[in-house]
Amino acid sequence: MKRTVLILALGLLPALLAAQEGNLVVLQNADSLEGRVIDGEDVRELIGNVHMTQGKVDLWCDRAIQYVRLGRVDLMGNVVVREDSLTLRAPRAAYHQEERRAEGFDGVQLDDGATILRARYGNYWIDRRLAQFSGNVLVLDSVSAATGDSLTYYRDDQRSIMVGNVSVNHRPDRVVITGGRLLHDGARDYSRVTLDPVLTQIDSSGGGRDTLVVRALAMEAVRDSARRFLAIDSVRIVRRDLAAVAGLAVFFTDGDSIRLRKSPLIWYQETQVSGDSIDVMVRRRALESVLVSGSAKAISRSTADTVGRYDQITGEMLRMEFRDRQLSRLDVETQAISIYHLTEDSLANGLNRTTGDRILMSFEEGKIRTIRVFGGVEGQYVPENVLRGRESEYRIPGFVWRTDRPTKDDARATPKRREGDQGKRKASS
């Protein structure tokens, strides 16, 4: 049932739409206004160039319907809600005056000057400075883009939580991290991804051959004086000829280096390297050097291997240098031991066992060219007739040949959670 209908065309109509001082919704402009009662509810429809305010909040749209008793205004067409530096845009929205909450539908965007949020649906509480978005959520800042199913954003803390099908693209580093949950702290420039996270560093110039894939129980991104990514617990790494496992991996994107800690082990081509800590240097997507500290070991299958023969070297510190993706130099210090199988015309010919304070090897096309030993030199030659069948007796201390080298498919598999769930504990570099 209709009451008196008032139509105002092409004019300004300041009016009070709320009853209490301090919670007033004021109409600043509309081309026309129509008032009516529907089912006992006082409804006012505003059409054309609508501009309303509540305190410092401005509302603009093409058409609005205001429910006086319910304290709600439905906004339609080119909706803009602005409060200080924050702007919310949507094709359709509702403004709840008591909560001071803007609710956007059908594709909403919130821009606060530092971060842009987009989603199919979103709520923003003006006094609480809190946003909750859902449905194809996209978050953009100066260096990254994140997508997911839902997002909670705390403006005062510069903190956001994204859940479901999370993907974070760190554009300057060509790094994409996917997972089930993202926590981002803008004040500290820190992010953490959990629930089966995978880090991928895209090789944009090598046809994808040098793309890096990392899996762990948690991933962290830190941007401070040394921009870095951390993979925490049950880490598995694959990159072309390089693979690795560790309890913790730290990737420094500026220096293009990787630190591996907590029982690290790497494979490069047919060589297996382990120690207490391993630092990997990469230059122009190619492996440059590997530094191993503490109980360092390098093991590879001998070219004479028909019965489980392995060339081995160990010491307290080991450095490997590479050229053109081939090992060119190996330097081991402190209690150095080298076990090298000899071959002649592809036939087994025994082995040499050498110890010293330092052993320096040079390689050419993957084969040993020279061996130099310094300090406390001792050597032993074991002929073929003595060696055959007794290969396991000639192993360095702590010898283990691992067969669990990660592959690209394995790196994408869900890692097993260690007892005590170490992935829940924040790691530091």
Image (spheres, helix red, strand yellow):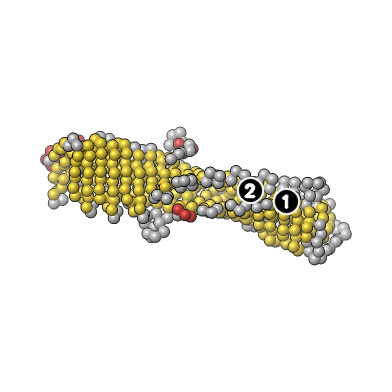
Task: Locate residue 205: give its quadrant.
Answer: bottom left
The mark total stands at 2
Q: Quadrant of the C terminus?
A: top left
Q: Residue at x 39, y 57 (%)?
A: 208
Is residue 372 toward the left or the right of residue 126 in the image? left
The x and y percentages for residue 181 are 53, 45
Within-10-Å neighbours for mark 2: few <14, some 14–19, many 20+ = many
* Between marks 1 and 2 in the image, the one whose residue lies nearer the viewer: 1
- Helix or strand or loop: what does disc 2 sit on? strand
Is residue 107 toward the left or the right of residue 230 in the image? right
Frontmost residue, 107 versus 21: 21
Q: Is residue 209 above or below residue 354?
A: below
Q: Residue at x 38, y 48 (%)?
A: 257
Q: Which mark is residue 56?
A: 1
Q: Which mark is residue 350?
A: none
The x and y percentages for residue 312 are 23, 41
Q: Is residue 25 visible?
A: yes
The x and y percentages for residue 23 are 77, 47
Q: Is residue 395 visible?
A: no
Mark sitting earlier along the chain (1/2): 1
Labels 1 and 2 touching (C-beta < 8 A): no
Q: Residue flagged by tag 2: what amino acid is it?
A: Ala
Q: Residue at x 46, y 47 (%)?
A: 227
Q: Residue furthest top?
A: 420
Q: Residue flagged by tag 1: what amino acid is it?
A: Lys
- Check disc 2 and report the residue beneath it: 131
Q: Residue at x 81, y 57 (%)?
A: 14
Task: Locate residue 120: give its quadrant.
Answer: bottom right
The x and y percentages for residue 26 are 78, 54
